[in-house]
Image (cartoon, rainbow, N blue to C red):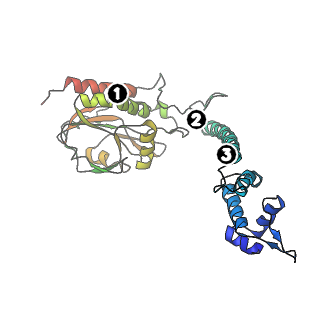
Amino acid sequence: MRIGELARRAGVTTKAVRYYESLGLLAPVRLTNRYRDYDEHDVRLTQEIRALCRLGIPVEGTRPFLECLAVGHRHADDCPAALAGYRDAIDELTQRIEGLTARRAVLAAHLHEAAHRNSRLSPAAEGEEPMTDYTSLPADLPVPEDDGAAAHLRGARMPHLELRATDGATVGLDALGAGRTVLYVYPLTGRPGTDLPEGWDSIPGARGCTSETCGFRDHHQDLLAAGAAQVYGLSSQGSDYQREVTERLRLPFQMLSDPARSLAQALDLPTFTTSGLALYKRLTLIIKDNMIEHVFYPVFPPDEHADQVLAWLGDNTHRP
């Protein structure tokens, strides 16, 4: 067959075919008229080169694979030299990944410094990674005060409201079932590499959503043993945002998404606004028989709140 047909069948250009031949990877027969004559084996070799190149193996690096076919093996990677070719390609990719990771870290540091240049918060010190550990809390966090914004909640019935959970299911807040449900409501969980709203640490009760969530995760079985039928977290972040948190923190319970803050409207829950975001203030509801039995508000410190809920459940195990 002529070069054009070979190129068409193998899915490459005629220029590529000539290049492979110049490297000695293809050796077509020369006819008396000096035209090249390619056969089915040349089609197979060309297809193999194309497939390996798409995996990131350079054209010259395909030679051991083609030689493996030339000695009669069914697969181009049946030979030790071909396996070594895979390893070389993996090593090269690993070096590139390490280089890109280092570049990414530098870019993240520049982003963090630029984002905080005019902020009251100090950027990371030279040589330090940007702050991405939201499980640790600063020692000087401001303590939220009880402003009475949750005083009306105890004894209120849960509204007929359905919210999307991180597993894709819809949860009816007026149909939570028998037993006590722990529903902790929080402002905003941080994401590694993503800046929190400006001045976040200076807002009483804002910082600590991740550490609070980790507390409920670590005490989940204890809470169930103490009488909680189920635990839910709830915020105004979308389901995709919360799904990332659920997977990253390996939560054993579902998070509920309320981007419209429908529960706040139905129960007149306390909220606050910062950086253009309307967010829930931190509180926890103990719900029993579709009524709010107990309210934790304000919540502080957030990293010890799961212990507080656990202690309350233990003290009220036999309450009718």
Query: Could you tell which of marks 2 and 1 lies nearer the N-terminus?
Result: 2
Q: Nearer the viewer, mark 2 or mark 1?
A: 1
Residue 183, by quadrant, is top left
Q: Which mark is residue 305?
A: 1
Q: Residue 57 appears at what percent x and percent y?
A: 70, 51
Question: Residue lying farthest bottom?
Answer: 33
Q: Kindly identify the amino acid type of the residue bearing the numbered disc 1.
A: His
Q: Residue at x 39, y 33 (%)?
A: 213
Q: CA distance from mark 1 to mark 3?
A: 54 Å
Q: Nearer the viewer, mark 1 or mark 3?
A: 3
Query: The residue tagged with tag 3: helix, strand or loop?
Result: helix
Q: Is residue 311 left or right of residue 318?
A: right
Q: Residue at x 36, y 48 (%)?
A: 167
Q: Which mark is residue 20?
A: none
Question: Residue lying farthest front?
Answer: 72
Q: Kindly identify the amino acid type of the residue bearing the numbered disc 2.
A: Ser
Q: What residue sits right under mark 3 in the picture?
A: 83
Q: Is residue 208 left or right of residue 84?
A: left
Residue 144, by quadrant, is top left
Query: The residue tagged with tag 2: helix, strand or loop?
Result: loop
Query: The residue tagged with tag 1: helix, strand or loop?
Result: helix
Looking at the picture, tell me which residue is in the foreground, 9 or 241: 9
Question: Residue lying farthest right?
Answer: 33
Position above or below: 70 against 167: below
